[in-house]
Image: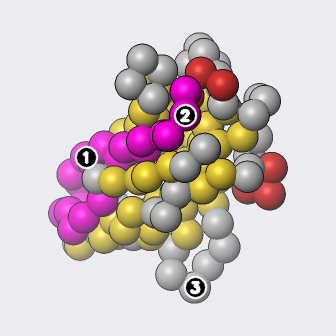
Amino acid sequence: VQLQASGGGLVQAGDSLRLSCAASDRTNKYGMAWFRRPSGKDLEFLASINWSGNSVDYVDGRFTISKDNAKNMAYLQINTLKPEDTARYFCAARKGPPRRDPDQYDSWGQGTLVTVSS
């Protein structure tokens, strides 16, 4: 499946942002997740969602993952943005249950850059 992330940009600290991930295949076949990579750092797991959308996992309550299987879309809502949230954000997909380990995913989007100014 091909993934296209969008919705990033320059925002102010305290703002909210919703990132989108468009899939070329039916998202009800995939567990999906969002990761981010701050400049010079490793990938960080943020949130995941199962094939049906009724089970989620996340590391921070400021992040909310959702998906719309009718539109083949996944989303990441980020609230109360902080300068340390500045990173390139990636969506990923795998057949089967979602995982926190990025090595378990075989489909990745190109990422969307989020820059948070203080």
Please name the residue that numbered disc 3 is placed on.
40
Q: Which residue is mark 1?
A: 16
Residue furthest bottom as drawn: 40
Q: CA distance from mark 1 to mark 3?
A: 24 Å
Please name the residue shown 66% across and 25% down the image. Answer: 29
Residue at 61 percent across and 29 percent down: it is 49
Pointer 2 local density, CA inside 10 Å: few below 14, some 14–19, many at least 20: some
Are the two marked residues, 2 and 3, in contact with CB atoms closer than 8 angstroms?
A: no
Q: Secondary structure at mark 1?
A: loop
Name the secondary structure under disc 2: loop
Q: Is residue 81 above or below residue 54?
A: below
The residue under label 2 is 25
Residue 57 is labelled as: none
At label 1, the amino acid type is Ser
Residue 69 x/y as whole percent:
48, 21
- Range of magenta residues: 8-26
Kindly indicate the quadrant of the structure image that contains residue 59. Answer: top right
Mark 2–mark 3 Cα distance, whole angstroms, equals 32 Å
Provide residue 113's location: percent of width, then percent of height: 37, 68
Q: Residue at x 46, y 63 (%)?
A: 111
Q: Tell whether 82 sits left or right of 29.
A: left
Q: Which sits in the foreground, 5 or 35?
A: 5
Image coords of residue 64 (percent x, y): 45, 34
- Camera-side residue of 116 and 73: 73
Q: Residue type at mark 2?
A: Asp
Question: How is the protein colored in the picture?
Answer: secondary structure
Q: Quadrant of the C terminus?
A: bottom left
Of marks 1 and 2, which one's residue comes earlier in the chain?
1
